[in-house]
Amino acid sequence: MYQKLDPILHSQLRLAVISLLISVGEVEFVVIKEKTNATAGNLSVQLDKLANAGYITIRKFFKGKKPKTICKITKKGIQAFEDYVKDLQHYIDVKK
């Protein structure tokens, strides 16, 4: 039987963000924007969905006069990603 895939992570942009954060832990908004080629508006919406799910934290502050936004993956986000990968692996194993 197929596993239900996490609807939060089953979005191309949200999955890309979580994949990036899995490898680096935390990163600035502008770096995520550059790596994913997302628009600022779309990325903000997707980050909010990840934060509301508890998968990431978002910290906003000023460094001098420049605003900074840092996104960090949470333990829940790491677990969700690992579960998502296991569920995908199940799909592959069923096909064999």
Image (spheres, rainbow, N blue to C red):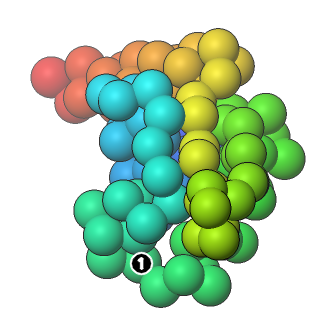
> Is residue 70 among what the camera can see?
yes
Mark 1 surroundings within 10 Å by alpha-carbon count, few (fewer than 14), some (14 through 19), many (20 or more): few
Residue 95 % position (x, y): 22, 30
Which residue is identified by label 1? 38
Residue 73 % position (x, y): 58, 30
> Is residue 87 among what the camera can see?
no
Residue 80 % position (x, y): 60, 24
Residue 53: quadrant of the picture: top right
Q: Is residue 36 above or below residue 79?
A: below
For the residue marked with disc 1, what is the amino acid? Ala
Residue at the far front: name it: 64
Q: Residue at x 47, y 85 (%)?
A: 39
Q: Secondary structure at mark 1?
A: loop
Judge by depth and name the residue closer to the eye, 29 or 9. Answer: 29
Q: Residue at x 31, y 76 (%)?
A: 37
Residue 45: quadrant of the picture: bottom right
Residue 27 % position (x, y): 45, 43
Q: Is residue 11 above or below residue 82?
A: below
Q: Is residue 39 above or below residue 63?
A: below
Q: Residue at x 67, y 37 (%)?
A: 56
Q: Is residue 92 above or below residue 12?
A: above
Q: Residue at x 40, y 59 (%)?
A: 32
